Image: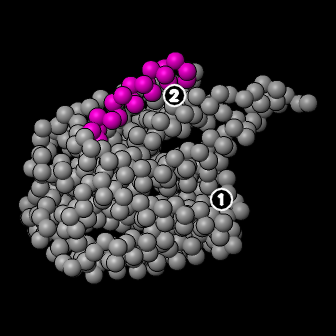
Amino acid sequence: MSLHATADRPPVGVAEERRPWTVLLLMLAAQFMVVLDVSVVNVALPSIGESLRLDSGDYQWAVSAYVLLSGGFLLLGGRVADLFDRRKVFLLGLGLFTAASLASGLAESATMLVLSRGAQGAGAALLTPAAMAVVMTTYAGRQRATALAVWGTVASMGIAAGVLAGGVLTSALGWRAVFFVNVPIGLATLLLAARSVAPGAGARRRGMDLPGAVTLVTGLLALVYGVERSGSHGWGSEQSVAGLAAAAVLLTAFALLETRAAAPLVPPRVWRVRSLVSASTVMAGVTGAVVGAIFLSSLYLQQVLGSSAMVAGLQFLPLAVVITVSAAVASKVLPLVGPRALIAAGLVVAAAGALWLSGAEAGWGYLSDVLPGFVVLGAGVGPMFVAISVAAMSDVPHEESGLASGLMMTGHEVGAALGVAVLTAVGGDLTTRAGLLAGYPDAFLVVAGALVALLLPALLVPGRSAVASGAHGHGHGHGHGHGHGH
């Protein structure tokens, strides 16, 4: 019996000892809160809006502040988890997330809510990569494969659980409970993780590109601000032009900093991996469409159709179920047809669902009109998440799979923020029934158009041959990308 170790398998005899699942359960508890917090706010928004007197822009920032900071700082968070003690980084991220959840629940104004949501996002950006690193280093062999599969499942359950939990908590205890619920879970996870996760020394090889991370995040914030202001003040308004100009300057500065940095957030060679860049672009677009659709529909269901928060949460369940089931079916079909065909078919089906929803009018009912649109939209979206994850990882060397899934998740989060901002700009006044009746159809026409336009980058995604080589990335990428954002 040889005792040599490989990259994936520590020495035989040493490593085949089974580790208890406690560590995985703690990492999953933390990650589940992070996933949940993207969609949990959606159903609570009308109640928050009434209580804090939010306008359309504030609605959008309550969602965008979280996804922008979690997505924008994600690559930096991954680097921090590599360089320093994973356990400390996890505890720091979880501590920040929990404290920011408390602040969100105590918010008395739109500004305080948006700032604390941003802090939650920054905590998530530290917590997620560190939790993944802890799982990868704690378990080996078959246990690791099981852990990654469970991770992926929990991530993809987040959309349904978030919308449902948001509805139940808001109806039973009021909107503040949506945030307060994280506090006891966060504190318990912190205490238990501090005791049961072994410290892991970081590999102090390369530095950190802090200026790159800061210019990226501020550039993205300026971009979303510019887009959102154009909806309320017009594209030519001073605020919109200033925001978009600042975004152009900051994002150009980011690109220049990356070429000069000793340890760039994304090494230049990664940008040359066509499959990764094209798949991440499609991921950003699809996520923007889905998160934007859920954002608008949660307002529509409550303010136009008169559903309570609880009922609205239940009305999203079929969408979540269809996404999950169609994703499971797609992973079986994928080896036969390849990612490119699956993504193209998914885009066409999802666009048809969006087109159906763009026909919304005053007399619409949920079962006869909204539900069929949800089902068709979900049937297109589910297969795309699976195919995009496999395609993105197909040409990435194993040792860079963490960085690649980080890049894909960044696309995922930034897409979500931009999707919500663009649809808010198109939809106009989303705080009243009349405004929603006028804006909802226009916004879904834009969603349909965007999904069709994504056929172009989808053509650059690898075909059937990619699946064999891409299989190793599937567990990692799918779990990571698939659920986090909806």
What residue appears at the point 18 percent right and 78 percent down from the top-left corner?
A: 362
Q: Is residue 262 left or right of residue 227?
A: right
Q: Is residue 336 above or below residue 485?
A: below
Q: Amino acid at mark 2?
A: Arg
Residue linked to disc 2: 86
Please tell me in which quadrant of the rendered image residue 351 appears.
Answer: bottom left
Residue 157 in the image: state x and y as whole percent.
48, 51
User: Gap in Å between the C-alphas at discs 1 and 2?
Assistant: 27 Å
Residue 392 visible? The answer is no
Residue 13 in the image: state x and y as whole percent.
82, 26
224, 479: nearer the viewer: 479
**Residue at disc 2, secondary structure:** helix
Residue linked to disc 1: 470
**169 magenta-colored:** no
**Residue at disc 1, secondary structure:** helix
Residue 471 in the image: state x and y as whole percent.
67, 57
Q: Which mark is residue 95?
A: none
Task: Give the dominant element type of the magenta stretch: helix, strand or loop.
Answer: helix
Q: Is residue 289 above or below residue 37?
A: below
Extreme-right residue of the structure: 1
